[in-house]
Image (spheres, rainbow, N blue to C red):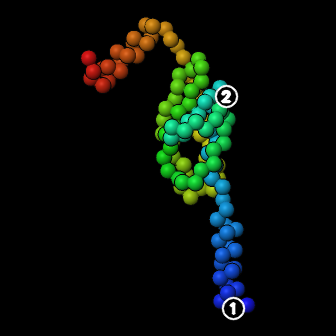
Amino acid sequence: MAFAQKIICLLVLLLVLTGCGEKVISIQSEPVGALVWLNGREVGRTPVLVHYIFDGNYDVRLERDGYEPIMTEKQTNENSVATNTWVFNLAPRNDDPELLLGRARALQNITGDN
């Protein structure tokens, strides 16, 4: 085998071995068992591991009966081969009508809708 071919084979092998990092998002919640969506796609219940290819922003939604839903945006660490860990604390749902009306009024004041 010619010297140039050996160098090319060595470079290809080196690229293959160093480029095999696995990218994972670990999504956890308290309490456990929340249903999780990433970018509108259901991925499982917490705790859940999600394998991904592209770094960037992800729309995250968590829901569990008896708790307020969480809708937010999270970002993966660029060029990371480690696990990105996202932990969410769910707040108990309070369906008291007076509390709901108070929150609606506060939202109206913020948005200017009357």
| Residue at 40 percent of width and 16 percent of height | 103
Q: Quadrant of residue 99?
A: top left
Instruction: Tell me the quadrant of the picture where the C terminus can be found.
Output: top left
In this rendered view, identify the residue nearer to me: 44 or 62. 44
x and y, in percent, of residue 37 in the image: 56, 36
Crowding at dot 2, Cα within 10 Å, few <14 / some 14-19 / many 20+, comes out as some
User: Three-letter amino acid code at disc 1?
Assistant: Phe
Q: Quadrant of residue 6?
A: bottom right
Residue farthest along the bottom direction in this orientation: 2
x and y percentages locating residue 94 in the rendered image: 52, 13
Q: Secondary structure at mark 1?
A: helix
Q: Is residue 17 above or below residue 2?
A: above
**Is residue 92 in view?**
no
Q: Which comes before the other along the chain, label 2 or label 1? A: 1
Q: How many marks?
A: 2
Q: Judge the density around disc 1: few (<14), some (14-19), many (≥20) Cα neighbours within 10 Å.
A: few
- Tell me where residue 41 appears, x and y as whole percent: 55, 38
Residue placed under numbered mark 1 in the picture:
3
Residue drawn at point x = 30 percent, y = 20 percent: 109
Residue 32: which disc? 2
Q: Taking 77 as reference, is 112 above or below it?
A: above
Q: Residue at x 39, y 11 (%)?
A: 101
Q: Which mark is residue 62?
A: none
Q: Is residue 2 visible?
A: yes
Real-space CA distance between mark 2 and mark 1, rounded to the nearest whole angstrom: 57 Å
SS at badge 2? loop
What amino acid is labelled 2 in the image?
Answer: Val
Can you say whether 21 is above or below 4 in the image?
Answer: above
Image coords of residue 42 (percent x, y): 58, 36
Q: In front of the other: label 2 or label 1?
A: 1
